[in-house]
Image (cartoon, rainbow, N blue to C red):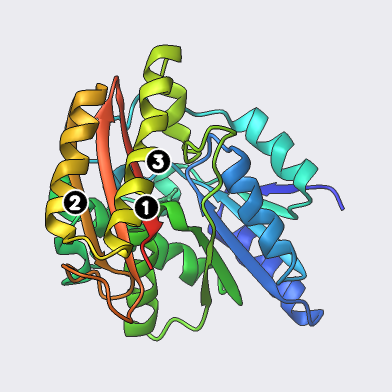
């Protein structure tokens, strides 16, 4: 099947209605474009769940704070379209900003609690923009499933909460983190890095993994995380937003691991990029 591209909500809805009338299931892969293997793995996974897969490309302005990289965010529509087609995606929804936020748009979607910590603290308002656009995309597509990468673990937790709280019937799935051959979690923002910065960036995974191991072996998480943050600065990261160990579902802080799944989360700046990563602890 050739990839179909639509830019309006009406066209998207028409296509989905057609598929549903034919008894087909529909999966949604929301992205901001600048696609890499991580995104393609989400499309591939979704192809295993749904008969028809929609990929969305929309660089959502409301999830970028003042001074963040909205204007610089890589836009590679032609290459993205080719990659989606090659992976086997059925439809690309790539609306202009005016289609998503028309004149007079005034509604916000906010999730309390889960958004107050980690990236919610270092990027105030970011998750309000994410939930606003994801609620709209889920509503527009009326898909059976939607998938989000686990690199943005907190985002996935926030979206799951929102979908549950708003009775959105789409089943939310997570896709595992895809890393390069040296362990760096793939991110569209890695494109900002030169060779020297990439070498430093790759240490985020190494330092977090070591800290996860130490905590799993009985270490006191706040001390281990503080030492890991220091290590990242020594290695050459310009700034560390956080290194924290938290419950994988509720995101409440964990001091020592027990039965409940815990994860270590890190966010740090190198060059023009702010990178995030996370690992299971137990
Ligand atoms: O993870 C992303 O790329 C974005 O936050 C998302 C979920 C597509 C919403 O704009």
Report, in whole angstroms, how far the alpha carbon at label 2 lies from the one at label 1: 15 Å
Q: How many labels does the image show?
A: 3
Tell me the mark number nearer the camera, choosing from 2 and 1: 2
Q: In which quarter of the image is residue 249?
A: bottom left
Residue lying farthest front? Answer: 217
- Examine the rendering and report whether any part of residue 34 can be seen: yes
Earlier in the chain: of badge 1 and badge 3, it is 3
Q: In which quarter of the image is residue 44?
A: bottom right
Residue with the mark numbered 2: 224
Residue with the mark numbered 1: 278
Q: Is residue 194 left or right of residue 70?
A: right
Report, in whole angstroms, how far the alpha carbon at label 2 lies from the one at label 3: 15 Å
The x and y percentages for residue 247 are 27, 71
Q: Which residue is drawn at 48% across and 69% down?
A: 138
Front-most of 167 and 151? Answer: 151
Q: Are marks 2 and 1 in contact (CB under 8 Å)?
A: no
Residue with the mark numbered 3: 205
Q: Which residue is drawn at 68% across and 71% down?
A: 26
Report, in whole angstroms, how far the alpha carbon at label 1 lies from the one at label 3: 8 Å
Label 3 neighbour load within 10 Å: few <14, some 14-19, many 20+: many
Earlier in the chain: of badge 2 and badge 3, it is 3
Residue lying farthest right? Answer: 1
Does the closest atom of ligand 1 sit within 8 Å of the Cβ of label 3? no
């Amino acid at each position: 099947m050739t990839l179909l591209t639509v830019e309006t909500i009406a066209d998207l809805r028409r296509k989905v209605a057609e598929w549903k009338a034919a008894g087909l299931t529909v999966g949604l892969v929301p992205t901001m474009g600048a696609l890499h293997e991580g995104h393609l793995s989400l499309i591939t996974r979704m192809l295993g769940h749904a008969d028809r897969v929609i990929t969305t490309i929309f660089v959502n302005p409301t999830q970028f704070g003042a001074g963040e990289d909205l204007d610089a965010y890589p836009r590679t529509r032609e290459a993205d379209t080719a990659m989606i087609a090659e992976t086997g995606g059925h439809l690309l929804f790539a609306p202009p900003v005016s289609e998503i936020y028309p004149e007079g748009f005034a509604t916000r979607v906010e999730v309390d609690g889960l958004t107050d910590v980690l990236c919610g603290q270092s990027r105030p308002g970011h998750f309000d923009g994410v939930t606003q656009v994801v609620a709209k995309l889920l509503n527009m597509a009326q898909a059976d499933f939607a998938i989000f990468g686990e690199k943005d673990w907190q985002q996935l937790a926030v979206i799951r909460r929102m979908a549950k709280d708003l009775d959105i019937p789409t089943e939310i799935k997570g896709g595992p983190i895809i890393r390069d051959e040296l362990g760096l979690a793939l991110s569209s923002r890695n494109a900002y890095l030169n060779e020297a910065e990439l070498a430093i960036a790759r240490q985020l995974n190494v330092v977090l993994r070591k800290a996860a191991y130490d905590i799993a072996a009985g270490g006191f998480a706040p001390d281990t995380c503080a030492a890991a943050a220091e290590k990242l600065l020594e290695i050459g990261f310009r700034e560390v937003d956080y290194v924290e160990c938290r419950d994988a579902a509720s995101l409440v802080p964990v001091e020592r691991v027990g039965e409940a799944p815990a994860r270590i989360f890190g966010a740090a700046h190198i060059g023009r990029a702010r990178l995030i990563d996370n690992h299971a602890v137990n």
